[in-house]
Image: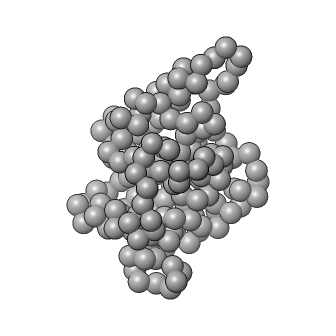
Amino acid sequence: MRIHLVFVGKTAFADMDSAIDRYLKRLVHYCRVEIHYVKAEKILPGTGDQFVCDREAERILKLTGRDAYLIALDQRGRQLDSVGLSKLFEGLIDSAIGEVWMIVGGPVGLSTKLVENARQVLSLSKMTFPHDLARLMLVEQLYRAFTIMKGEPYNR
């Protein structure tokens, strides 16, 4: 399986990038992972959040293609525990889904259109997190999910 992680904008903190890289280096033992950065739309006074989200969604869909298996990370999504996430990916692997695109939005989130087009919509928590932290949490949870699938001790 290949997982494409789509992040809107660059990570603001070098320490966060370092932590993400730590889990990516572990995760590549289980699957191929690629990170794609999509340019964040400038947020100017008077620019509505929906406009920003729609412009970023256009960039994301251009990158992924309209028929890609998209998993959007959004506060409106379904919450899974770590075992549930591992079962989700186990099901995708069993269904021969070879490529999955997971999308973490920027500061104003994801457009409704993009969320509606996603095959899965997941939420990391009912709480709101900075998008940089959401990236780290996602990568760590993916690593945890794959160790659960393999019965390895990280999850314990």
What x and y, as percent, mark residue 114? 41, 33
150 relative position to 12: left or right: left
32 relative position to 11: left or right: left
Q: Residue furthest left?
A: 95
Q: Residue at x 23, y 61 (%)?
A: 95
Give the answer, above or below, for where 84 lies relative to 16.
Answer: below
Give the answer, above or below, for where 88 lies relative to 100.
Answer: below
**Toward which corner of the image does residue 105 lie, by quadrant?**
top right
Question: Quadrant location of the N terminus?
Answer: bottom left
Q: How many marks?
A: 0
* Residue situated in front as seen by the camera: 25 or 23: 23
Q: Residue at x 32, y 45 (%)?
A: 119
**Toward which corner of the image does residue 107 lie, by quadrant?**
top right
Q: Residue at x 71, y 61 (%)?
A: 18
Q: Residue 39, can we see it?
A: no
How does the figure colour the protein chain or chains? one colour
Q: Residue furthest top?
A: 46
Q: Residue furthest right?
A: 14
Q: Residue at x 45, y 42 (%)?
A: 76
Give the answer, above or below, for where 33 lies relative to 117.
Answer: below
What x and y, as percent, mark residue 98? 31, 57
Q: Residue 81, can we see it?
A: yes
9 relative position to 142: left or right: right
What x and y, as percent, mark residue 139? 55, 61
**Toward which corner of the image does residue 118 lie, by quadrant?**
top left
